[in-house]
């Protein structure tokens, strides 16, 4: 029988975890499980609403056939009647049969011997679930009431004769034929174990066999004789089936050790299950408990510490609450790190204990219902960022080996006095240059509302970010290699408050969106800049560009999209992500802060083997114009702001119907995507970034989707390659605004996706620019720590 049983499937849907167990694709198992005192209660919580329970009940036949799959021909039981063995599964009408199969082992009790000497075709019980009713009960109970058909192959029964009651020896093959039986499975969620993990305890399985449910052999099936025999054997058969159902339901809820797995501390392997003294079984981890070696992901890491260990698992004191027709599971969370040499060594306290949210069955501020919700505590997010800092994750040296835009030649264009320091090099590109990050204070993470507004020009503006990443006194050292050693040219110290939003891409992954970088920086100070002739105010002008170059290194080696959990066909379709439970005090920026980040979603279910119907938008883009400006406008010594080129792009989208409305997102290189903006088909959009102030090759990627259909996002971006060249002559603009020669009718080809030569929209007369920018602007590793209950993250091949 397939190991994922029905109850396990329900549990995982309730828990909404990326993986059931102690690891995910990018973390290794911890050597020692977290102790309860290392974790904070209610660091996260998962809510299955009344609507969510209704969804499971309504889709039960498909769910059962997905989670419970009978394997063949060598499975625990043969395929039941009416099914066939096809490609290793028992199938019915071309799909996996929605049947639970249980083999009854040889059993003896009260003088009755059952299934001794049975062949493979005997002693097999098949349960077909017709429907289910899930009823949460206060304080922490869930009753699962099944309506099921129970059928069996021949069950061999032997009972020696007795003087009283006067019965002869019975040797009989019994068959179960119980239709529409009501089976009650009471469940209680408890945490009274040494690790305080949430454990499901099953009560007595409630069902009763009637005489008509059992067929005895020959004359023993006559009514009068049957009544006597059933009175004797009924309790034995009921107890047997009760135990078998309980074993099936519980088999994947405890830590196994049959393959030599290590049991958690103070437990040992007994009968292939990890048990504490007294025989209590160790519950499995629902959530994430693992360790991450930051140096595997962060190129340029200055000081390598021990791996960062993290946990966000279902459990903790008072961690299960039933009410308002739904069920809430609390999660314990925390981090462990030994620290790194580049930051002060201070003990890492667990997150503070919180209290659960007062969940209702609608999304706050609306009448829209949800089926599952995930709450991640701001306190847990903040401790994750603190642990990331203590592990040396923000002590980085970023040079041209990580981004070709970080070079002495490039920055000499911005700060002319650097040219004097480069004298003696045969080429300025030979002079090594790097930016070194030095956090002087512990960074912070706070949760905001996640609110947008539309400005007068119709643009979406992130007025209240969902996540606020703050770093006071963040120092950026500019270092130039002179005479074979690095010399610090200047130290720029800033207070950083990065505002971010979350959205969903075409693969149902959480994608990180950034607001306007110009709003990130306050309290700028320039120190130790004696080697440069520029004033402190002039040097400070390059800070937005420096940050857009530096922050990406925090995401090196990681995908920026975080997959939402999927299990056996279940998906989470996000409706809204917002801050929950307003805090009394606002943040330093005057905006409201919240105790939790809430993710509200519907459940989706697609049976295995069935391809979901998906709508995908196609994006096309063509470069229209680059505002190069004059050479001197790029120098910080010139009056006014450093020139920031504006890139005009003509944009089209298709695939969602004639009347569809579209929105687009864009990014520079492989950085963070910008928040989505609405546009009209064929419109000219104008894009600007601090990185465009660096002369040289750049790449823009654009993706469109239909408004209101998040997962229609184009999986392959349209790509624009261009070169910022202050020396470029003014380009001739044709009447329809395209850069360079007017496209030839029938030859113009807007290109979708990545091309080998880097072109995007070209004519036969166009020449592709050489090279392209690979600068990134992400910080996904922080979100890996922040959103660990959702993870099935992936590591790129480095």
Image (cartoon, rainbow, N blue to C red):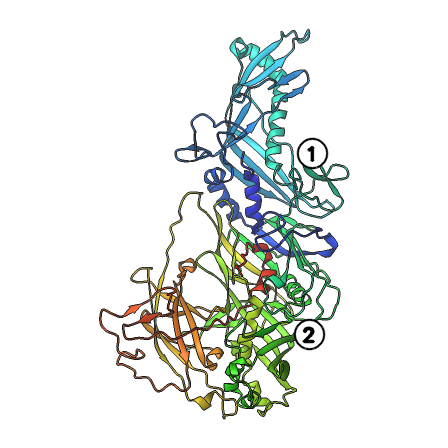
- Residue at position x 69%, y 42% from top? 282
Q: Mark 1 = which residue? A: 271
Q: Nearer the viewer, residue 285 or 454?
A: 285
Q: Considering only vertical position in the picture, is 387 above or below 53?
A: below
Residue 383 percent location from the top left of the image: 67, 64
Q: Nearer the viewer, residue 596 or 104?
A: 104
- Residue at position x 68%, y 6% from top? 163
In which quadrant of the rendered image does the N terminus lie?
top right
Number of the front mark, 1 or 2 = 1
Could one spot residue 589 in this view of the protein? no
Q: Mark 2 = which residue? A: 441
Q: Considering only vertical position in the picture, is 348 above or below 173?
A: below
Q: Secondary structure at mark 2?
A: loop
Q: Nearer the viewer, residue 482 or 538?
A: 482
Residue 42, quarter of picture: bottom right
Residue that protrudes farthest toward the left in the picture? 745
Q: Nearer the viewer, residue 48 or 678?
A: 678
Position of residue 771 in the picture relative to residue 737 (left or right): right
The span from disc 1 to disc 2 (Cα, nearest Å) is 51 Å
Q: Which disc, if any, is residue 207?
A: none
Q: Secondary structure at mark 1?
A: loop
In which quadrant of the rendered image does the C terminus lie?
bottom right
Position of residue 76 in the picture relative to residue 391 (left or right): left
Count of all numbered marks drawn on residues in the image: 2
Residue 526 percent location from the top left of the image: 62, 86
Residue 726 percent location from the top left of the image: 42, 86
Q: Considering only vertical position in the picture, is 101 above or below 444?
A: above
């Amino acid at each position: 029988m397939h190991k994922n049983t029905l109850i396990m499937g329900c549990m995982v849907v309730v828990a909404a975890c990326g993986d059931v167990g102690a690891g995910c694709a990018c973390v290794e198992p911890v050597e020692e499980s977290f102790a309860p005192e290392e974790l904070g209660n209610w660091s996260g919580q998962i809510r299955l609403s009344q609507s969510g329970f209704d969804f499971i009940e309504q889709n039960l036949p498909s769910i059962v056939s997905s989670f419970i799959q009978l394997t063949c021909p060598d499975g625990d039981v043969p395929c039941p009647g009416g099914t066939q063995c096809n490609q290793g599964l028992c199938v019915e009408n071309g799909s996996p049969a929605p049947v639970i199969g249980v083999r009854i082992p040889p059993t003896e009790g009260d003088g009755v011997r059952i299934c001794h000497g049975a062949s493979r075709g005997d002693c097999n019980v098949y349960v077909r679930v017709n429907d289910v009713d899930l009823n949460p009960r206060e304080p922490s109970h869930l009753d699962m009431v099944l309506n099921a058909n129970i059928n069996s192959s021949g069950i061999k029964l032997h009972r020696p004769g007795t003087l009283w009651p006067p019965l002869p020896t019975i040797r009989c093959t019994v068959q179960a034929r119980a239709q529409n039986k009501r089976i009650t499975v009471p469940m209680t969620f408890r945490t009274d174990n040494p690790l305080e993990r949430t454990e499901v305890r099953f009560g007595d399985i409630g069902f009763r066999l009637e005489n008509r449910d059992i067929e005895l052999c020959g004359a023993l099936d006559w009514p009068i004789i049957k009544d006597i025999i059933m009175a004797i054997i009924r309790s034995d058969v009921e107890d047997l089936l009760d135990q078998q159902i309980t074993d099936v339901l519980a088999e994947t809820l405890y830590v196994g050790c049959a393959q030599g797995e290590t049991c958690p501390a103070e437990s040992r392997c007994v009968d292939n299950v990890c048990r504490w003294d007294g025989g209590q079984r160790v519950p499995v981890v629902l959530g994430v408990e693992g360790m991450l070696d930051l140096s595997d992901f962060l190129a340029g890491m200055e000081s390598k510490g021990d791996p960062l260990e993290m946990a966000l698992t279902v459990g903790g004191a008072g961690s299960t609450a039933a009410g308002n027709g739904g069920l809430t599971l609390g999660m314990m969370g925390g981090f462990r790190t030994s620290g790194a040499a580049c930051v002060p060594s201070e003990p890492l306290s667990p997150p503070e204990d919180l209290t659960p949210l007062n969940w209702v069955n609608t999304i706050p501020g609306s009448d829209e219902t949800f089926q599952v919700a995930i709450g991640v505590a701001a306190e847990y997010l903040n401790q994750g960022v603190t642990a990331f800092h203590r592990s040396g994750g923000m002590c980085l040296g970023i040079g041209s080996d990580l981004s070709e835009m970080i070079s002495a030649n490039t920055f000499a264009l911005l700060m002319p006095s650097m040219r004097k320091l480069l004298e003696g090099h045969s080429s300025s590109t030979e002079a090594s240059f790097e930016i070194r990050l030095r956090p002087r204070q512990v960074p912070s993470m706070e949760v905001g509302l996640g609110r947008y507004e539309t400005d007068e020009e119709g643009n979406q503006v992130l007025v209240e970010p969902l996540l606020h990443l703050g770093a006071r006194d963040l120092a950026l050292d500019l270092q130039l290699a002179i005479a074979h050693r690095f010399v610090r040219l200047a130290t720029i110290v800033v207070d950083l408050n990065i505002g971010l939003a979350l959205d969903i891409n075409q693969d149902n992954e959480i994608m990180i969106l950034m607001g306007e970088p110009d709003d990130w920086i306050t309290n700028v100070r320039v120190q130790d800049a004696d080697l440069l002739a520029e004033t402190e105010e002039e040097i400070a002008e390059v800070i937005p560009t420096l940050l857009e170059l530096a922050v990406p290194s925090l995401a090196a080696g990681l995908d920026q999209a975080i997959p939402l959990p999927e299990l056996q066909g279940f998906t989470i379709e996000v409706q809204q992500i917002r801050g929950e439970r307003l805090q009394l005090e606002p943040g330093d920026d005057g905006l409201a802060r919240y105790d939790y980040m809430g993710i509200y979603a519907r459940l989706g279910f697609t049976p295995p083997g069935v391809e979901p119907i998906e709508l995908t938008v196609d994006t096309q883009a063509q470069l229209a114009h680059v505002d190069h400006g004059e050479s001197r406008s790029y120098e910080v010594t010139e009056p006014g702001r450093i020139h920031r080129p504006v890139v005009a792009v003509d944009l089209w989208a298709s695939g969602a119907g004639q009347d569809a409305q579209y929105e687009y997102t864009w990014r520079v290189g492989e950085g963070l995507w910008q928040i989505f903006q609405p546009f009209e088909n064929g419109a000219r959009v104008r894009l600007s970034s601090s990185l465009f102030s660096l002369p040289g090759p750049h790449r823009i990627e654009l993706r469109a989707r239909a408004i209101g259909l998040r997962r229609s996002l184009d999986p392959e971006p349209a790509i624009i390659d261009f070169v910022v060249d202050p020396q470029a002559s003014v380009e001739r603009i044709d009447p329809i605004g395209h850069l360079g020669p007017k496209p030839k009718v029938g030859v113009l080809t807007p290109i979708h996706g990545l091309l080998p030569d880097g072109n995007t929209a070209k004519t036969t007369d166009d020449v592709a620019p050489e090279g392209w920018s690979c600068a990134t602007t992400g910080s996904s590793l922080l979100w890996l720590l922040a959103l660990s209950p959702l993870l099935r993250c992936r590591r790129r091949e480095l």
